[in-house]
């Protein structure tokens, strides 16, 4: 969505390496924001973003105005299924409908062979993978690892909202996820026990152990990869993060 940081640039660097042509979209998509969310205040830095993408060797930047993506009378939506019901989908009703619809439009306009998304938004990439498969979109969805600050905080455009003391507190989210991962590595299969470990961070919207592909909650962590997902408010800022247990 723009306000580029090293997390975004990890996607463009990999895409640049894998493909002859690199297209990047910068679009703060109004339909994935709830009425009381931060659409109008969301960080925007188009000139800086364009300079960074030029450095990255992008061939094309698609940065349409909202009315080009949603002209008057626009009224067709993609409604993802169960994969979008929990976690972010539960706290942000309609969010994944907006994400799926705009990503389907971007895929249709740009017609990429491969599309790159970050694991930081773990449910988002699961929703997009499911959509690409279910609708035979012919796009190979590539997931890139979460890029972090040295203290573990996942890079996010919304980190810019953190006040200094909140920025200091925010790495607790990743520390808690690491503690859960360690508990699992030490042989704990009980998903609830993993959850209980240390995931009592600031003000928690949710903390879940889900199947990493379907996003459906699991009781025991078995053969299938599981994702421990957290959304928490640090001060006024809502942050998400996750680790995958494989
Ligand atoms: N720290 C990160 N590591 C890897 N990929 C990331 C990271 N942060 C964002 N991305 C990915 O970059 C793409 C664009 O994300 P987006 O523009 O929403 O950025 P963001 O920084 O996650 O914003 P916000 O957290 O404010 O929603 C998404 O695929 C997202 O998962
Ligand atoms: C997938 C996406 C481009 C849809 O607007 C956005 O949610 C993002 O940048 O993560
Ligand atoms: N990075 C996911 C986009 C959003 O929070 O709306």
Image: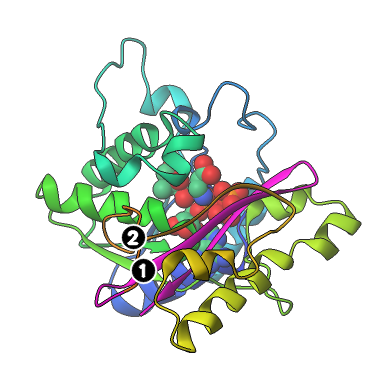
Which quadrant is the C terminus positioned in?
bottom left
For image coordinates 39% across by 26% down, the residue present is: 68
Cα distance in 3D space between marks 1 and 2: 8 Å
Indicate left or right for 85 with 184 as reference: left
Is 245 in the magenta? yes
Which badge, 1 or 2, is on the more N-terminal residue?
Answer: 2
Q: Which residue is mark 2?
A: 218
Is 218 in the magenta? no
Indicate left or right for 101 with 244 as reference: left
Instruction: Spot the residue most to the left.
Output: 136
Q: Secondary structure at mark 1?
A: strand
Q: Is residue 58 visible?
A: no
Q: Is residue 203 visible?
A: yes
Q: Which residues are magenta?
A: 222-246
Indicate left or right for 2 with 191 as reference: right
* Image depth: mark 1 or mark 2 in front: 2
Q: Is residue 124 above or below residue 59?
A: above
Q: Is residue 59 above or below residue 45?
A: below
Q: Is residue 213 above or below residue 75?
A: below
Of residues 205 and 104, which is closer to you in this image?
Answer: 205
Give the colour scheme of this rendering. Answer: rainbow
Percent across and percent down for residue 173 are 67, 64
Q: Which residue is mark 1?
A: 226
Q: How many marks?
A: 2
- Mark 1 closeness class: few <14, some 14–19, many ≥20 residues within 10 Å: many
Q: Secondary structure at mark 2?
A: loop
- What predominant SS class does the magenta segment belong to? strand
For image coordinates 31% across by 73% down, the residue present is: 225
Percent across and percent down for residue 222 are 28, 75
Callout 1 touching callout 2 (CB < 8 Å): yes
Percent across and percent down for residue 202 are 75, 53
Hey, which quadrant is residue 240 in on the image? bottom right
């Amino acid at each position: 969505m723009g306000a580029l940081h090293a997390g975004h640039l990890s996607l463009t660097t990999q895409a640049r390496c894998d493909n002859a042509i690199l297209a990047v979209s910068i679009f703060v998509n109004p339909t994935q924001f709830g009425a009381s969310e931060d659409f109008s205040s969301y960080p925007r830095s188009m000139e800086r973003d364009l300079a960074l993408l030029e450095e990255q060797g992008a061939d094309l930047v698609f940065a349409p105005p909202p009315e080009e993506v949603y002209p008057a009378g626009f009224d067709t939506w993609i409604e993802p299924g169960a994969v979008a019901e929990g976690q972010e989908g539960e706290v942000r009703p309609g969010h994944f409908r907006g994400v799926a619809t705009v990503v389907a439009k971007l895929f249709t306009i740009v017609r990429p062979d491969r599309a790159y998304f970050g694991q930081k938004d773990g449910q988002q990439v699961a929703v997009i993978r499911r959509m690409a498969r279910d609708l035979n979109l012919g796009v190979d969805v590539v997931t890139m690892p979460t890029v972090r600050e040295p203290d573990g905080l996942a890079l996010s455009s919304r980190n810019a909202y953190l006040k200094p003391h909140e920025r200091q507190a925010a790495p607790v989210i990743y520390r808690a996820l690491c503690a859960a991962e360690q508990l699992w590595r030490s042989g704990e299969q009980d998903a609830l026990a993993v959850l209980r470990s240390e995931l009592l961070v600031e003000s928690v919207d949710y903390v879940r152990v889900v199947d990493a592909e379907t996003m459906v909650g699991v009781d025991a962590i078995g053969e299938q990869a599981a994702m421990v997902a957290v959304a928490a408010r640090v001060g006024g800022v809502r942050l998400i993060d996750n680790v995958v247990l494989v």
